[in-house]
Amino acid sequence: MNSKELIIEAGRTESQYWKDLWKYRELFYFLSWRDILVRYKQTVIGIAWALIRPFLTMVVFSVIFGSLAKLPSEGNAPYPILVFAALLPWQFFSSALSECSGSLVTNSNLLAKVYFPRLIVPASSIIVSFVDFLISGMILLGLMAWYNFVPDWRILTLPLFIVIAAAASMGVGLWLAALTVEYRDFRHIVPFLVQFGLYVSPVGFSTNKVVPEQWRLLYSLNPMVGVIDGFRWAILRGETQINLPGFTLSLVIVVLLLWSGIWYFRKMERTFADVI
């Protein structure tokens, strides 16, 4: 008579965790597609909202900083393009951060019933924000056509800066997602952080033109400074120069945020089902 042995190996779940991420990739696809359908099916104007919001923000910033405050643009680049080149990564970051931070609470029923690597939930929520990002990019194309502004070879580096923006939102989002499970008050803190971050990031103005040179390295402790400056460098052709020390510092901060976010999320992950 054949018999089967059940072997319980200490630490096996931990060692298989990253393999399980690949094993449960279909769940990642399902959650991503579900969130995309919910985002666009349950809104009155659907996809148009992803176009109207950044467009109106760009108009307001262009009027306040460009027309009223008379802040300079980069070289001959039109001010609306300068602003929108920053709004694209910022709205991707802020939207992904908001979606990621509340993703575990939103999917609490799923977490309490079945096992799967919980990292899939916040990671899948970022896909929705990326779809918004792609749709909003249509406005940038329209602005370039309106102003007859053609980018150069630097536009090919744009995917690199998109990856950095996603890493920044994932890193901060993982911290906030885990903290929101433990302390529900963070649901009210996240909108304040997003609004505050908008004003301390160079969205409505140029870092090179407004921030004094002696303060730029300190200013680059905000990881979105490097991302936004990188987007402008890629989109505005030779009209702007990237501050390499500041960009390097922002990149290091992004890497630290992502690494520490994954570390803290994994540390708290085993308690999610009990606490949530």
Image (spheres, helix red, strand yellow):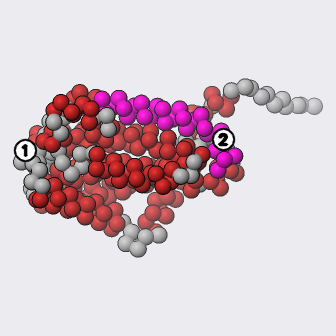
> Please, is residue 14 above or below residue 123 in the view?
above
Say which of marks 2 and 1 sits in front.
Answer: 2
Q: Nearer the viewer, residue 149 or 226?
A: 226
- CA gap between label 2 and label 1 equals 53 Å
For residue 209, what is the image quadrant?
A: top left
Q: Which residue is mark 1?
A: 75
Q: Can residue 60 be found in the magenta stretch?
A: no
Q: Residue placed farthest to the bottom in the image?
A: 44
> Please, is residue 257 above or below residue 122 in the view?
above
Is there a contact, CB below 8 Å, between mark 2 and mark 1?
Answer: no
Which residue is rendered at x = 27% and y = 32% of the image? 218
| Horizontal side, residue 18 vs residue 162: left or right | right
Identify the element where label 1 is drawn.
loop
Residue type at mark 2 is: Thr
N-terminal-most mark, 2 or 1: 1
Which residue is rendered at x = 18% and y = 34% of the image? 242
Q: Can residue 250 be found in the magenta stretch?
A: yes
- Magenta-colored span: 249-276
User: How crowded is the residue under tag 1: few (<14 C-alpha within 10 Å), some, or many (20+)?
Assistant: few
Q: Nearer the viewer, residue 189 or 37?
A: 189
Residue type at mark 1 is: Gly
Residue 269 appearing in the image: yes
Where is residue 230 drawn, in percent x and y?
24, 39
